[in-house]
Image (cartoon, grey):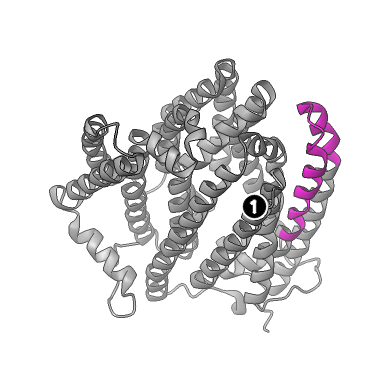
Amino acid sequence: MKTGTDSLSQDSSLAHVKATTVQGGAIALVVQAIKFVSQAASVALLARLLDPGDFGLVSMVTGVTGIFIIFKDAGLSMATVQREHITHEQISTLFWCNIAVGLALATLTAAMAPALVAFYHEPRLFPVTIVLGSMFIFTAASVQHQALLQRRMRFAVLGLIDVVSLVVSVSIGIGLATIGLGYWALVGMTVGLPVANAVCLWIANPWRPGPPRRGSNVRSMLRFGGTVTLNQILVYIAYNADRILIGRYWGATTLGIYSRAQALVNLPTSQLNSAIGSVALPTLSRLQSDPDRRKRYFLQGYELVLSLTVPITLTSIIFAPEIVELLLGPKWLSAVPTFRLLAPATLAIAFINPFGWLMFAKGQVERSLYMSFALTPSLLLAYFLGVHYGAAGVATGYSVVMAILTIPFIEWSRAGGSITAMDVVHSVKRPVGAGLLATFVGIALELSVSAQMAFYFRLVIGAGLTLLTYAWLLLIVMRQKDFYFNLVSNLLLPKFRRAPEAVL
């Protein structure tokens, strides 16, 4: 293998980036669809095999130690992807930095076990914490292998690895739950994912690390990674302190209900953001020398994210009882109010998150960090005020703060760039307009469909007609049919059609 810069540089030609982006988008969407079905199935099965207290018990640990996951790559995977040129020596040095961090995190997690037992007054947390800590070692060993595949835009390989790892993880969880091991099924599933992922990445990527070297010019990359990591720490605290407070003041059962509602409402939108984001970051990074094209790609991608997220989130709010009963079962219906109260926050994040891809691709990690310094204390205050009213109070505070911060954060993200406020409005107006009109149809259907009808029929009829109404409004009334049909045709037939320049 060559070790010079050229061997690890990206092909940044416009034809290559455009073709790879289109194909990568197709692969990512298919992979996320498979992952969504797999995760939804696992949620439904585990909710029936386990008790809320089992989920709450594991959430007590992951809510605290989950912050360590941020350090799993120390921001160095993003540094590898974002750089235009990088050498074998630099990546090897970053690999050993990741390993050192992984070992330190596993040790620190084990050392925290007694403190968690004392904090929650729950002795079962001691072995759970130690076992969960082992996953950091496997995660650290795969960071640079995954970053290299993403840098080279090998989306098909990454997609296959994601699916295989998830299937292995879910199989472990369901298998352990079936034989009656309770919360250990969740522990096994959590640890099994990074283990399977690491094994697959090492098999798929022939790159092997050399010894770490001084003078390999990684200082700027470490600084970049450090800023990314600090940003992720603040974001993690902002998005996870709610579970810590609920677990501390309301116990494992309430936390289990809250965490399941949160996971369920985030499932479709997180999959969509993950699918498109995995393609958007390397694509936008490759277009650093062509800001006009990067702007067009971003705005088209942003509208695509919203056109998929808005109808799913609004439909989830309307048909929350049916969705919860279908996926979690009747014993979880108490999660419906929390599910609905969390949905606006999920929608707000969908409006804000894509601007993070743009900032990171442009190397504006400091700006993202400043935004996190504003976000975290705002959410913490909302959680502390809301926790006195239980899970519903926390969920309400979360959604209110995210709704208030949406427009300021979008303006802050785009400041100083070529994207104007009218560009954002143009990308937002059609998905939001169609979504609001379809919402009225969905509410009317929810109120008119007989309560005596089986919940799954109510869901199929109500949600199906709501989504069809949305599609009709967006594609026909708002005349977006050609744009989306061209996008789909290029995703499905990338080798036989020339991708339009303005389509991500």
Position of residue 276 measured from the top left corner of the image (x, y, whole percent): 43, 57
Tell me if residue 112 is in the magenta stretch: yes
With 17 as the anchor, is 147 left or right in this view? Answer: right
Numbered range of the magenta stretch: 111-138
- Does residue 241 show up? no
How busy is the neighbourhood of tag 1: few (under 14 within 10 Å), some, or many (20 plus)? Answer: some
Q: Answer with left or right where residue 494 lies relative to residue 223.
A: left
Q: Is residue 28 left or right of residue 125?
A: left
**Position above or below: 76 against 351:** below
Residue closer to the observer: 42 or 418: 42
Q: Position of residue 301 (x, y in %)?
A: 36, 55
Q: Which residue is mark 1?
A: 178
- Residue 504 in view of the camera: yes
Q: Is residue 292 magenta?
A: no
Give x and y (percent) for residue 392. 50, 23
Work out which quarter of the rendered image holds the N terminus and state it.
bottom right
Q: Nearer the viewer, residue 40 or 434?
A: 40
